[in-house]
Amino acid sequence: MFGLFKKFKQGFSKTVSAIAEKTHGLFGGRRIDAASLDELEEALYTADFGVATTTEILDEIKAAYRKDPDLKGKQAAEIGAAVLRKVLAGAEGVLEDKPRSATSDTSNPVVIAMIGVNGSGKTTTTAKLAWMLKQDGKSVIVAACDTFRAAAVEQLKSWATRLDLEIIASHTGADAAAVAFDAWQAAKARSHNYLIVDTAGRLHTKSHLMEELAKIRRVLQKHDSEAPQHRWLVVDGSLGSNSIEQARVFHKQFGLTGLVVTKLDGTSRGGAIVGIWRELKLPIYFVGLGEQPEDLQPFSIENYAKAVFGLDS
C-alpha cells in the first residue's frame, strides 16, 4: 500500500494554490527577495503550518539567501520540503499485519477502532480503509457500531454494497457493544485478518457516548486482551490546528494509537498535519485526499513535503 504522488499533489492543490496566490507564484521561478520572504511567511501561516514550523522554514531559506542572493523560488521550495521531512520524521504510521505481543493468539483478527466526532468522515473512511485492505489481499469485516446516529448504519451498509465488503450490522439504537461482539466472533470464525469498528461520533461532553466506546473496548477485550490493537482518531483536516484539542481529549480518554486526517482536498490549510504531529506525536496512518475509495492514501512524508510546496516527484 504505497501512496501515489499524483494523489498527494491533487489532494493538496488548494494549499499549493493558496501559497502561490499569496506569494505571487514565488515557487514558479521568481528570485527570492525581502518582499517575497514576507509573502511566504504570511502564506505559511495561512496554510496553518504554525509558528514553529514557519519559523524553521524561513530561517533555513534566509540562511540560503544570504549565501546566494540569486536564490530562486524553486530552491526555496526544496528547502521548505527538506525542513518538513526533518520535522515529520517518525510521523508515518505503518499498519502491520499482526502487531502482536509474544503471548497473543496470532489467529485473532487485528481490530481497528475508528473514533471521532460526527462530520469527520469516519464512516466513509471506515469503508475506504476496508476496501484498501481488501485490494491489498487482506480479508476484512466492518462492524457498524455507530448505532446512535440516524442513518449511520445505512450509510455503512451502502458503502459495503458498493465496495463488496463484509459487514456486521444491526439497527439504529441497537447495543453497539453487542454488534462489536458479534463482529469479532464472525471475523475470528472466518479467519479474517482485520475487523474495523465504526463507532458513534461523539464529543467529550457526551458522557454516555464516551462510556459506550469504553464498553465496546471492554467487550472486545473479553475475546482478545490486546483489542482493539489500533485506536485511530479520524480528524477533519479542514479544521486545521483546531483539531489538536479534540485529539488531545480523545487521547487522554482512550490512549489513541494513531490518526487519519480526512478532507484535505477541500482545504487550503494542509499545513495543519505538521502541527498535529508536533503537538501530539501520534503517527498519521492515512490521509483523505478526495471522495473516491482510492483517494484514501497511506501517509507519506516524502509525498506530502513535495506536494505542499508544489514540487514534482
Image (cartoon, grey):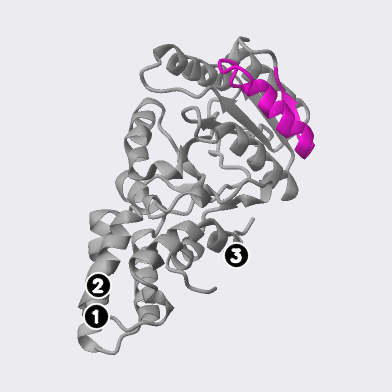
Amino acid found under the numbered disc labelled 3 = Lys
Q: Which mark is residue 37?
A: 2
**Magenta region:** 145-169
- Residue 176 visible? The answer is yes
Tell me the residue at 47%/48% (across/down).
284
Sequence-earlier tag: 3 or 2: 3
- The image shows residue 258 at horizontal and vertical percentages of 46, 41
Please rate how many residues cluster around mark 1, counting C-alpha atoms within 10 Å: few if below 14, some from 14 to 19, many from 20.
some
| Cβ atoms at labels 3 and 2 below 8 Å apart | no
Quadrant of residue 193 in the image?
A: top right
- Residue 60 visible? The answer is no
- Of helix, strand and loop, which one carries label 2? helix
Q: Alpha carbon of mark 1 to alpha carbon of mark 3: how far?
A: 31 Å
Magenta-drawn stretch contains 159:
yes
Please rate how many residues cluster around mark 2, counting C-alpha atoms within 10 Å: few if below 14, some from 14 to 19, many from 20.
some
Q: Which mark is residue 33?
A: 1
Amino acid found under the numbered disc labelled 2 = Leu
Quadrant of residue 153 in the image?
A: top right
Which residue is at the front of the view, 59 or 195? Answer: 59
Q: Alpha carbon of mark 3 to alpha carbon of mark 2: how far?
A: 28 Å
Please rate how many residues cluster around mark 3, counting C-alpha atoms within 10 Å: few if below 14, some from 14 to 19, many from 20.
few
Sequence-earlier tag: 1 or 3: 3
Q: Is residue 166 above or below residue 75?
A: above
Q: Which residue is mark 3?
A: 6
Amino acid found under the numbered disc labelled 1 = Asp
| Cβ atoms at labels 2 and 1 below 8 Å apart | yes
Which residue is at the front of the view, 17 or 168? Answer: 17
- Of helix, strand and loop, which one carries label 3? helix
Q: Which mark is residue 98?
A: none
